[in-house]
Each structure stands twice: as structure tokens, then as C-alpha cells.
Image (cartoon, rainbow, N blue to C red):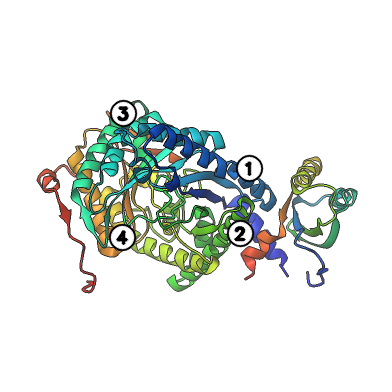
Amino acid sequence: MLTLAEIVETIKMVQEENLDIRTITMGISLRDCAGPSPAAARKKIYDKITGLAGNLVRVGEEIEKEFGIPIVNKRISVTPISLVAESCGEEDYTGFAKTLDEAAEAVGVNFIGGFSALVHKGFTTGDMRLVQSIPRALATTQRVCSSVNVATSKAGINMDAVYLMGKIIKETAQLTAHRDGLGCAKLVVFSNVPEDNPFMAGAFHGIGEPESVINVGVSGPGVVKNVVERNKDADFGTLAEAIKKTAFKITRMGELVGRTAASRLGVPFGIVDISLAPTPAVGDSVAEILEYMGLERCGTHGTTAALALLNDAVKKGGAMGSSYVGGLSGAFIPVSEDAGMIRAVEIGALGLDKLEAMTCVCSVGLDMIAVPGDTGPETIAAIIADEVAIGVINHKTTAVRIIPAPGKKVGDRVEFGGLLGRAPVMPVHPFSSDIFVRRGGRIPAPVSSLTN
Amino acid sequence: MQNLKQDSKGNRVIISVLGPDRVGIIAGVANILSENNINILDISQTIIQEFLAMVLIADMEKSKINMEQLKEKLAEKGREIGVKIDAQHEDVFNFMHRL
């Protein structure tokens, strides 16, 4: 039987420590919507999404009330549109993005992911059309998120795609210049992209996935922060153990909510993504967890080690708490979405280079980073190349979500609002990478037996 | 909470009260439950300094109202007597603390 202390602990996590379920994401296959007529394909897409996800928001809200745990977002991921739109002759896929946007609005979700292409080895006609459509698609829709996978550990790095994405990111920023380049906040460039990630902006419904599925992303930096605070004199073994136990409890909530939602919606339960996902809210910060471990500011020497401990302890506890762990499942370190990261950048404790090092030991990568508006496409491509190289060599997912904020310079600030937060503009290296990036071709896949 | 009745069919809720100790808190909650045919299985409470933490386990099997309505009634009573009252499905706690 439950003890009073256990019951009070759970209630405290929700009421005082911001424990919530970050997202319930319904994955929907659109593979059966392809066809030669763009209009017919789009109608099928709209009907399928609104048919399957019609009850998603209602069921989410029902579960929220019964369990007393907030579910912050209800979202949808779909088959990469490059695969679905390819059969029709249309050159510009913006129309498909608009259909996704309309379907998302109709069912009441705030984001829909899957305006995506997988081009780690090369482009098909549909892939190229999709990528070329990204700037317009993101500028003319509200809810659509886009992602492009440019590298895998098995295929190497498609540097043509990396360079192209540098240009696409610039163009996306220009087309949404009136909102500080907001379009770029909805665009992620990946290596080793997972097919079942429930978190935006990188979510899509992979080709190995079933017809429809429910994936859940948990949250809980606030809960972990309080545990670290309570163990301020403990040695590392004790600290790791305490984080592990807490991660287990957080993950159990994800498992419960995911299973309940899947059963009520009549679709299979996929995975729990055990990532620690911060929000701009005070006390919901990954950077603060690292600081409570004993660092004056996130970004100083020792930050990578602290993050490695945190990330590993969360995985160990989480893996025990859920029968299926998947997605990204590692701590997120987005700058604009984490009050502690923002503060660390503003006082000069944290820069791009340290962030890059931190991505070696956690998930996602350079996330929600604002750089000066005059940063060239070659420099952005080189930043992407560095980040995906870390993923490819280390057999892990990495990603870049970078915003070259139009008209802004170092020290300025961009505001996206809501969960996307605000970001101080960070400096990039002034030395050119142009010749390197323009070489073109593919960086070969790494050998994996010589691991040092 | 060792002697809880074991015959429930997964309709158990945990009602929690947090706030300053007052006369009539248990009576207030118990009234709402009895009016709506919700059976109380167990009550336990502790006073931490001057604050009361009370946890009540109840069975909604034959309840006249649903979870949402119960939560509303409890929240309203809580506002009236100046404490925070909430109800959550028991699974939340079992899932978090038991394998």
C-alpha cells in the first residue's frame, strides 16, 4: 500500500516542481495518401489526420484532469512529406504544408511535424523539391515543423545537403524577418534522426512505424533540480543514484499517460521519450541543475562532466521506468527555451564552442541558438557539419536549430514567445569556412572498430 | 494504510488536502463524498508544523458523479474553507511508487 509520504511526494512534484508531461504526440502514416493529383493527395491527408487525431486533444485533457498531471502539448507527427508528395508532379510543396497546417488547426494541436526529408546519402526529386519549399512553407504556416536528416553513422555526411541547408536556413530567416527569423525555430537539421521522436520541431512519423501510434515526451527539470539541491553535500555516486530514482518516477508518469492515451484513442502505444526538456519558466531549467551540482554558471569548466552525469543518470532511471524508451531520450540544452542557459550566455559564461562540447554527452545538439543576421550560409553549414560529425562519429543523434536573426548583432535579443522563448544573439567565429564547405560531395561513413 | 478494502475495481481516487488546519475539513470532504455515493476506504493525516496534509482514499465504483465533477466540488469546498483539495486517480501514485 502507498504511504502518506509517497502520496505527498507525488503531489509536491506536480504542484511545486513543475512536473508535467511535455507532449503527447500522435504519429500518423500518410503513405496511403500519395497520388498523381496534388489536390486529391491533400484531401486524403487532411481527412486522415482529422479522422485519426480528432479526439487527441479531448482525450489529452481528460487524462490531465483524472490524473491531475498537466499535459502541456498535444501534437501530431506525420510521414516525411517528401515521400508523400513525390508522386505528384507539383514542384512547390508549400501547398502540402498548408494542408498540414489546416488539419492541425482543425484538431486543435499547436504543432505538426513531418515537413521532412531524409537525404543523408543523396536527394531524390521529391526530397529536393521539399527542401526548396521549406522557407515558403514555414513562412506561410503557423504550426508546421520541418526537419532534414543530412547524415548517419552508416552513410556518412551529405555535405551537399549540409551546404544547401545553410542556404535554406538563411532564406527561411529572411522570409520570417519581421518575426526575428521565427521560421528557423521550426526547422531542424539532423544526423541519425530517430523515427519516433515526439518532440518538436524534429518530430516525424518514420517509415518503420505503424499506421498510427502514440508517443510521449516527459519533462521534469524542476523535479530533478530539487533533488540535486537536496543532495548538495553528497558525493557523485549518491547524487547519481538520487537523480536515477527521480528519473524513474518521472518516466512512470509518461508511461501511464502514454498507455492510457493510446488505449482511449485505440492506437498502439509507441515509446516514452525520457528527455529532460526545459521551458523558459523559472525553475524548469537544465542549466540550473548543472549549477546546483556546484558550478558557478553553466558553461564553465566542469559543465560537460556535470551534464554527462545528469544525462546518464536520467537514462538509467528512465530505462527502468518504461517498457519502451525511444525518441531522443537525453537532456535538451536549448538556449532560448531555458532561463539558466539564457542567463549563462548573457553574462558570457556560455558560448557556441562549449555548447558544441556539451552536445557530445547529451541529446539534440545546438538547439535554438540565435546568431548575427549577417552570418553567411557557409558558416551556418560549417556549424551544422561540426555538429553532425559529432553525431556520426559517436553513433548518436545530433541536430542544429539555429536562427541567423535578420538585422540583429551580438548582444541583441530575439523574442519568439511561448515555449520557444527568447535568445541572446551569440557570436560565431569570424574566420571563413567557405572553401571547406563548398567542396561538395559526401564525407564517408566512419570505421567503427577503432573507437578512440 | 495497511487495512484497505481490496474489493475495488480500479475506480479508486486519492483525495489530498493541503493547507492550514481548520475545523470541519474532514467533515466537508466526507459530506461531498457521501452525497455522491462515494465510499471512503481510508483516511490518514499528519500535521507538519501548523499545516495539515490529509490523504483520503475513496472508491468511485458507484459514484453519482464523474471525476471532473468531483474535482470541481472539492476545489469549491477547498476555496470555501481555505485549503487546497484535489483528487487524482490512484494509478498515478501506484505507477510512480510501485512496480
Which amino acid, mark 1?
Arg
Chain label for disc 4:
A
Q: CA distance from mark 2 to mark 3?
A: 42 Å
Q: CA distance from mark 3 to mark 1?
A: 35 Å
Q: Which one is earlier in the sequence, the residue at label 4 or at label 2?
A: 2
Q: Residues within 10 Å of mark 3 (few under 14, many from 20)?
A: many
Chain label for disc 1:
A
Residue B62 in sight here: yes
Measured from the top left, where is residue B97 in percent x and y? 63, 67
Mark 4, mark 1: which one is toward the viewer?
1
Which amino acid, mark 3?
Leu
Determine whether, in the image, residue A223 is placed left or right of residue B55: left
Q: Secondary structure at mark 1?
A: helix
Task: Tell me whether the residue at label 4 lies in contact with that at label 3, contact meaning CB atoms closer than 8 angstroms.
Answer: no
Which amino acid, mark 2?
Leu
* Residue tagged 2: A256
Q: Residue at left 25%, top 48%?
A: A384
Q: Which one is earlier in the sequence, the residue at label 2 or at label 3?
A: 3
* Residue tagged 1: A58
* Residue tagged 4: A360
Mark 3, mark 1: which one is toward the viewer?
1
Chain label for disc 3:
A
Determine whether, in the image, residue A68 is placed left or right of residue B77: left
Q: CA distance from mark 4 to mark 3?
A: 32 Å
Which amino acid, mark 4?
Cys
Q: Which one is earlier in the sequence, the residue at label 2 or at label 1?
A: 1
Measured from the top left, where is residue A228 in percent x and y? 49, 61
Q: Residues within 10 Å of mark 4 (few under 14, many from 20)?
A: many
